[in-house]
Image: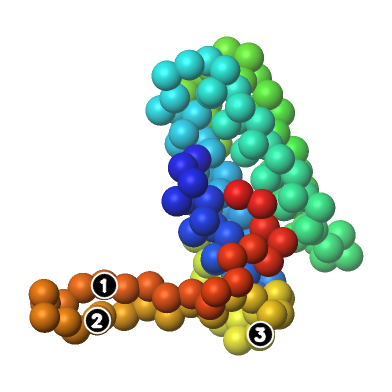
Amino acid sequence: MTKETIKTFQYRITQATASQLVVILYDMAIEYLNDACESDSAEQAHNNIYMAQKVIDQLICGLDMQYEISANLFVIYNHMKRSLISASVSLDNNEINRITGLLKKLRASFYEVSKQDDSEPLMKNTQAVYSGLTYSKGGISNETQTDNIENRGFRV
């Protein structure tokens, strides 16, 4: 995952509600698995698969087991982890793509739920980011402005 992608995920996380955070976790796992399929070295592929497994661990930790759907999701997530372990050993891109497909289907469902979530973001006191067009003698340019506090606990 590139530094730019990591920064994008960091920004999305700071602005996310609880249901949007689940969608972001799916996006992260999908990104890691795509990187694993595209990687040139076996070590890099193993690393990306490992990171995808850690994201799935976070999805498992976030389950509220008092609901029946959580038990079903727990079974699916464990299946994904077992499949990724075997795919990591054999570096089977077909298996990685199958798991990516499952993640995309689950992400689509949670994305629909997140569109109905009108709660406030989970994180308070985060950076304000303003983006827009700037007019100058040279023409129109895109500009992004953040407040001047560089690091609010994130390590890059």
Q: Mark 3 sits on what residue? A: 120
Above or below, 71 against 139 in this view is above
Circle 3: residue type: Glu
Disc 2 crowd, CA 10 A, few/some/many (<14, 14-19, 20+)? few
Residue visible at 71% across and 80% down in the picture: 124
* The quadrant where residue 20 appears: bottom right
Residue 65 screen position, x and y as percent = 86, 60
Q: Is residue 11 left or right of residue 50?
A: left
Q: Which residue bears the numbered disc 2?
A: 134
From the top left corner, tell me how far across and down residue 53 is, in percent: 68, 37
* 70 with respect to 93 (left or right): right
Q: Can residue 21 be seen in the rendering of this structure?
A: no
Residue drawn at (88%, 65%) of the image: 66
For label 3, the crowd category at 10 Å Cα-Cα, with few meaning under 14, some 14 to 19 and many 20 or more, is few
Name above or below for residue 148 compared with residue 57. below
Q: How is the image coloured?
A: rainbow
Mark 3 vs 2, N-terminal side: 3
